[in-house]
Image (cartoon, rainbow, N blue to C red):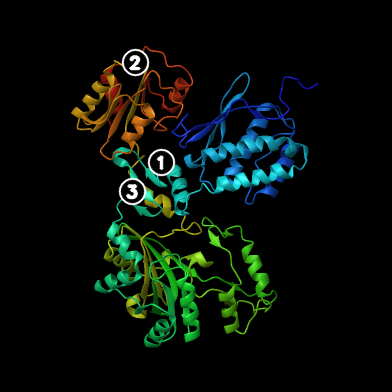
Amino acid sequence: MPDPAMPAVWLLREPARACTGFAYASAYPSLLCRLDGPAMPASACAAAGERVATLLTRFEPPPVPAAETDRGAALAWLLGLIDACQAAAGLPVCEAAHVIEHESEAALCQIPAPGRSLGPLSTLLQCLLALLPALLEGRRDPPLEAEFVRLHGVLAATNYRSSNVPRFVRAAHGLGLPLRELPGQFLLVGEGVHGRWLDSTFTDATPFIATQLARSKMLAAAHLRLAGLPVPPHRRVGNAAEAQAAAAALGYPVVVKPANLDGGTGVAAGLENPGAVARAFEAARKHSGEIIVEKHIHGRDYRLTVFQGALVWAVERVPAGVTGDGIRSIAALVAEANADPRRGSGDHAALKRLALDEEAQGLLEQEGLSEQSVPQAGHFVRLRRAANVASGGMPVAVFDKVHPDNARLAVRAAAALRLDLAGIDLIIPDIARSWREGGAAICEVNAQPQLGGTTSAHVYPQILAAMVPGSGRIPCAILAGSGESSTLAQEVAAMLEARGIATGCHDHAGVRLAGEWLHQGPCGLLEAGQMLVGNRGCAAMVLSLPAADTLAAGLPVARYDVLVLGPGSVPDPAATMLRAGAPGQVIADADPAAVAAALLPD
């Protein structure tokens, strides 16, 4: 007989709590919740996972527990289900949800997540628990399933607006670098003197003037010409008639594109007649009021990524299209290409879906083809004039083939606009042959390039490792249970500053850095620590735990070097949370010299 005291389903013993700081050594903000429930048959778990997979795209069910499952295994499966929901939403979470401690009535669990996602994740968790009985029993609950799908969409919408950011988040965690999101979706990577800001691929070293120049194709081209670099001729136009006149003057074929947008938006290349130019102008004007007509340069399309004065990656951008096999129609080949799980329509898709739209139909007509045509084996059918990955193109790595002259050309282009990180779009017959021999043209310089994840995932950690030295951490001590009147923090800070280390000091009086007040008056440990972690003048910090601070919102850092437990009591859960973040060095007495020595570099 089942235990009548055991709940029939898993439930929250109390509302999940959002911990916006760091807790229990996790490198993410997290949800903390107490879950209680019974063992569940493995077959029911498998069926539940398969049903969720029919509701959510890109959902990979977690491994099912053993056939003779117990309560702990059932909880592990449930937490895996929550992790899978976050993964299906595209959230860059590199830690698994886990049990912190098993209690008599429930298990205290931690679910790491981006801070911006904690609220929607909590709501989704509640909905999942409500839906779980039906999932386990194989029943359908259409209203609740629809709400679950809707809430999962809300969770997915909390992802970062740029696809670069989740990849930087994963790279930072892979390197073990401290990471915190700042207001405005900016990232702080590293702490104190090692801290650096990122806004997608803008860094805190990217000059504002450089970004303004790069965003204006007219100005960027002018500066590149001044630097002696090859750029195609172009003219700014205000209407379709001016566009046609400019095309005639430049000579066909031409490109029509917005002068102030990136990512291939509104770009039409390879235009051969006035009618195509007029149509392209009207299409581009829907995206921008600044339109240019540019001479089309024949050659292959390459993106060369430059960082800190060196070429770090290069790809050829093969335009959207399909290659015939002599058997299947173009429509069937497009459907097969779109079945690639990497292809999608959202901002975070590694590749974009192919579309047989008006532009594709026009290109097919030029070849005397239609959707139902069966191209010969090996024949490439182009579906886009521009080769941008954002319009369905495929990146092919060519870094090892780049001629040194072409690498220097890309570096010169980034330097001409004084960009620390740039994507140089180069049209050239062959990237392995010097542009001085075969000719080339720089058609665009991107100040905030999408690096992509298909061939260039390794570039993200490469960039972060160059920006943030070592572990990215600064020495940190947390003093707990010493009483508000203790001068320990001030004494330790003074010893470090005597060694020339600018030290942040937090005690009952406020927060100081190198003796200067940053905040006068009491404040919590999280607030004080975040104040110092975000200050590029801070090389070490000593933080005090006020007696009334329960650490409900977490800690300012995931790891610290020294934990001092003074004679005063530190009640749970604060004591457990503090011990979890310490690397093992816990000092029971309040000896300033010992604390300072533990913080000094080797």
Can you name the residue that lies furthest to the top here?
Answer: 567
Residue occupying image coordinates x 19% and y 32%: 500
Query: Is residue 181 placed above or below 37 in the rendered structure?
Result: below
| C-alpha span from label 1 to label 3 | 13 Å
- Which structural element holds mark 2? loop
Depth-wise, is mark 2 or mark 3 nearer the camera? 2
Residue 302 in sight here: yes
The amino acid at mark 2 is Ser
Circles 2, 3 touching at the beta carbon (< 8 Å): no
- The mark that comes first in sequence, 1 or 3, is 1
Task: Identify which residue, 169 or 221, lies in the foreground.
Answer: 221
Image coordinates of residue 233 in percent, x first then y, are 34, 79
Instruction: Say whether residue 176 is left or right of residue 503.
Output: right
Identify the residue at the far right of this view.
1
Q: Quadrant of the N terminus?
A: top right
Question: The disc labelled 1 sits on which kind of residue?
Answer: Leu
Residue holding disc 3: 467
Identify the residue position indicated by label 2 in the image.
Answer: 482
Give residue 536's position: percent from left, percent from top: 28, 40
Q: Which secondary structure, mark 1?
A: strand
Q: Residues within 10 Å of mark 1 (few under 14, many from 20)?
A: many
Q: Position of residue 510 (x, y in %)?
A: 28, 26
Residue 492, quarter of the rendered image: top left
Determine crowd level at label 2: few under 14, some 14-19, many 20+ residues with C-alpha closer than 10 A. Answer: many
Between tags 1 and 3, which lies in front?
1
Give residue 179's mark: 1
